[in-house]
Image (spheres, rainbow, N blue to C red):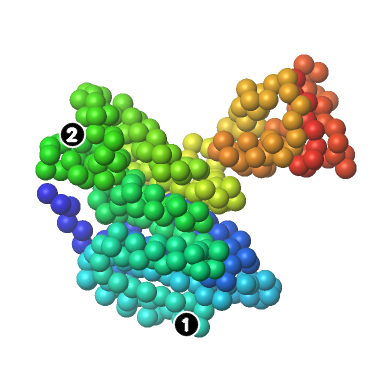
Amino acid sequence: MSKIIPKIWPQELHTKAKHLILKAYLQSWLAIVGQRFQKIVYVDGFCGPGIYENNEPGSPILAINTIKEVLNKLGSARNLKSEKIELYFFDTDGDRIESLRGEISKTSIDGSRIKVVIEQGEFEERVLPIVKGLQAERALYGTISPSLFFVDPFGVKGFSLSLIGEIFRLNSSEIFLLFDVDGIDRILRAWDEANSHIMLAIYGDSSREELLKIKDLPDQNQRLKMLRDLFWVALRNQRVGGIIPFGMFDYSQKILYDLIFLTNVRTGFSKMKEAMWKVDDSGEFKFSDAEHGEQLRFKFTVNHEDNLWGILMAKFHGQKVSGLAIKNFVCDKTIYLDKHKTAALKKHESSDISKKDSIIVSNRIRNYGYPDQALIQFP
């Protein structure tokens, strides 16, 4: 039986955390692409009514307000190249669409710069023409406008692995995806030929045998882990480079879903990590309603530079490598940020560290920092 979704519903704490991540990334993404491209595309494929019961703004209003803030900031600095930002909001429910129209009508939008499209319909049928239009743009002009797809379905249906592949073949697109692993597990446990198409749409036809093996495992935690791992493999097969999951848990510490950011753009990967660190600076990238109450920004005492140092030593011990190689490794292969890399290296260049644990730095112009051209000898 399908889950009945009301027209408007209360905003949960984990939803606030999700919106903090989305807003932080939108700010960075727009500030970067807005200075380089004439057109930008943002798609919210399961947009909802635009408001919650407590009058908190929904994701479409949050996106519009964030875009307006960035436009004002960049415009005042005369650094704005983008002449058009296209926003697409889709939902299958007519009542939610009408509610969103009403909420957007309350906002002031510069129609000469921001194009807003609000339509009722299935995500895939609405998004494919946008993807095809971007593909045609590349064929005509040799370049393609950057696009960000926010995919937050009401349940497990509504997106497919093949569509993710279509989006990523654009090479300038990124996806912020809600992955309802608990819901997927429930459907998997009730697997039959009548509903198998749901699972195979998400994982791909080649995953059938592996899914059936996972289905028979008695331990739910093991199933959830393997369902996540299998999805990462499926995404890699679609040539998705960067994948960052952020777990959302309820008051009973039960996993609700993973927020997954997908990108083939190194800068986007780095900026989304920064957004997620703003919500959880433990480096675990998770949010629990039970642990944090109303506090959405929290501190932990984890020693990140020591954790990262262990990762760097496992990769580079005994080697002399460039600052650029270390920077790219930390960006592409770890959850850590450039500031964590600097702290880890600085600590091990300190006179307080024994020689057997010290790095030796050469080829840097100034006597500080770890620029791209610097050479770092690891112990």
How many dots with numbers?
A: 2
Which of the 4 image quadrants contains residue 61? Answer: bottom left
Q: Are marks 2 and 1 in contact (CB under 8 Å)?
A: no
**Residue 139 location, x and y as percent?**
49, 64
- Considering only vertical position in the picture, is 12 above or below 86? above
Q: Which amino acid does the dot numbered 1 rest on?
A: Gly
The residue where tag 1 is placed is 111
The residue where tag 2 is placed is 189
| Residue sitting at x 25%, y 41% | 200
Query: In this rendering, does residue 288 appear at all?
Result: no
- Considering only vertical position in the picture, is 194 above or below 303? below
**Residue 117 location, x and y as percent?**
37, 74
Which of the 4 image quadrants contains residue 107? Answer: bottom left
From the viewer's perspective, is 6 left or right of 79? left
Which of the 4 image quadrants contains residue 97? Answer: bottom left
**Residue 54 location, x and y as percent?**
33, 64
Q: What element carries label 1?
A: loop
From the viewer's perspective, is 376 left or right of 127? right
Q: Quadrant of the C terminus?
A: top right
| Residue sitting at x 31%, y 26% | 222
**Residue 213 location, x and y as percent?**
24, 26
Label 2 to label 1, Cα distance in Å?
49 Å
Residues 129 and 217: in front is 129
Q: Is mark 2 on a helix, strand or loop?
A: helix
Q: Which amino acid does the dot numbered 2 rest on?
A: Arg
| Residue sitting at x 26%, y 46% | 201
Residues 301 and 137: in front is 137
Residues 116 and 134: in front is 134
- Considering only vertical position in the picture, is 146 above or below 322? below
Q: How many other residues sit within 10 Å of disc 2, few (<14), some (14-19) or many (≥20)?
A: some
